[in-house]
Amino acid sequence: MQKLILFGIAGFVAQLVDGSLGMGYGLTSSTMLIALGISPAVASASIHFAEIATTAASGTAHYRFGNVDVALLKRMVVPGALGAFVGALFLGSISGDLIKPFVSAFLLLLGVYVTASVLLGLRKTREKKLLSHWKTVPLSIVAGFFDSVGGGGWGPIATPTLMAHAGMEPRRVVGTVDASEFAVTLAGSLGFLLVLGLHGINWSWVAIFAVSGLIAAPIAAALVRYLPAQVLAAIVGGAIILTNARTVLASLGVDTAVVNSLLLGGLVLWAALVAYVVRQHRRSATLAEATA
């Protein structure tokens, strides 16, 4: 029961992040599950099965609101699903203890990338160019593969890349990525099912993730009205980076005292970053009010 409560909290927090930033459900929940000692394969499988219903609903809603570029969707679905399926087979066929440091390192890098993308507005500094067909396919394969291996990665990899190069409205990029994620999630789930089997997946964990996500969804919608995306990105990004950094450093055999010192320094930098972002937001809000 204690573990189910912790998983419920993980799913709740992950949905708050995803509903507020438009990405990060798998990234956040995978980080929390691995930190709780769950093997990467079981963690990713649980997340993917819980996401089947939510991605289907999200993709349908985006399609009805005209947020989906059907041509781009068709180019992304098959290679993305293939990458996710292969990623699930790969993750499920190797030792959890062996792959855990690498998954944590990947999640750490994703945390840095997502934080930088949101905080620094990297997509605004790049020239918008249409992404060619031959670039869309490898992008989808890589994003799908790491979505299964890392428990999340389709949104954090595909969305910022398409935002920078797709040459289309941001809402259509988000809608297309969300709509295509259903196929990616389904393919990854089937891969985990083949490797782990029905008995290798804890369906109570899947259920608690789904339920906690549904509870958090309306709260996230309200939260994003009061808590700016930049502030939330600084809070969540720092947590993801520090949590996975601990796992990576420990796997490298770094002395515990050194790890703790580095994490303490990271906490100080994290707090300074959040304070800076809050101050910048208030300054921008004040300036906007004065201009109005």
Image: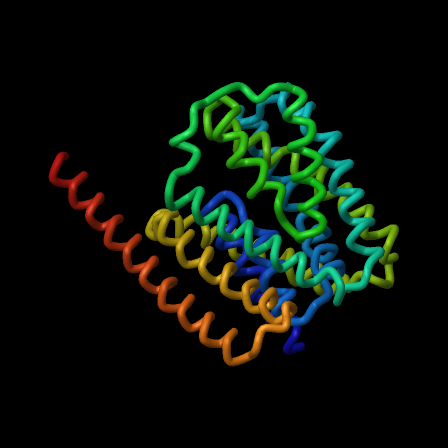
Taking depth in this image into account, of 132 and 208 the one nearest to the observer is: 132
Location of residue 126 by image quarter: top left
* Number of numbered discs visible in the structure rendering: 0
Q: Is residue 34 above or below residue 232?
A: below
Residue at 84% in and 62% down? 200
Which residue is painted at 55% across and 51% down in the image?
109
Q: Left or right? Give the position of 73 relative to 269.
A: right
Position of residue 101 in the picture relative to residue 14 (left or right):
right
On the rendered image, what quadrant is the C terminus found in?
Answer: top left
Q: Quadrant of the N terminus?
A: bottom right
Q: Quadrant of residue 188?
A: top right
State the residue in front, 99 or 231: 99
Q: Is residue 211 above or below residue 82?
A: below
Can residue 172 be seen here? The reply is yes
Residue 154, position in %: x, y?
62, 41
Residue 5 appears in the picture as rendered = no
Snapshot colouring: rainbow
Coordinates of residue 136 in the picture (x, y in percent): 64, 26
User: Is residue 137 left or right of 130 when viewed as pictured?
Assistant: right
Among all residues in the image, which is located at the extreme bottom?
Answer: 257
Picture residue at 61% right of the left edge, 68% below the top: 35
Where in the figure is residue 32, as x and y percent of width and height? Answer: 59, 64
State the image coordinates of residue 248 (x, y, percent, origin top left): 60, 64
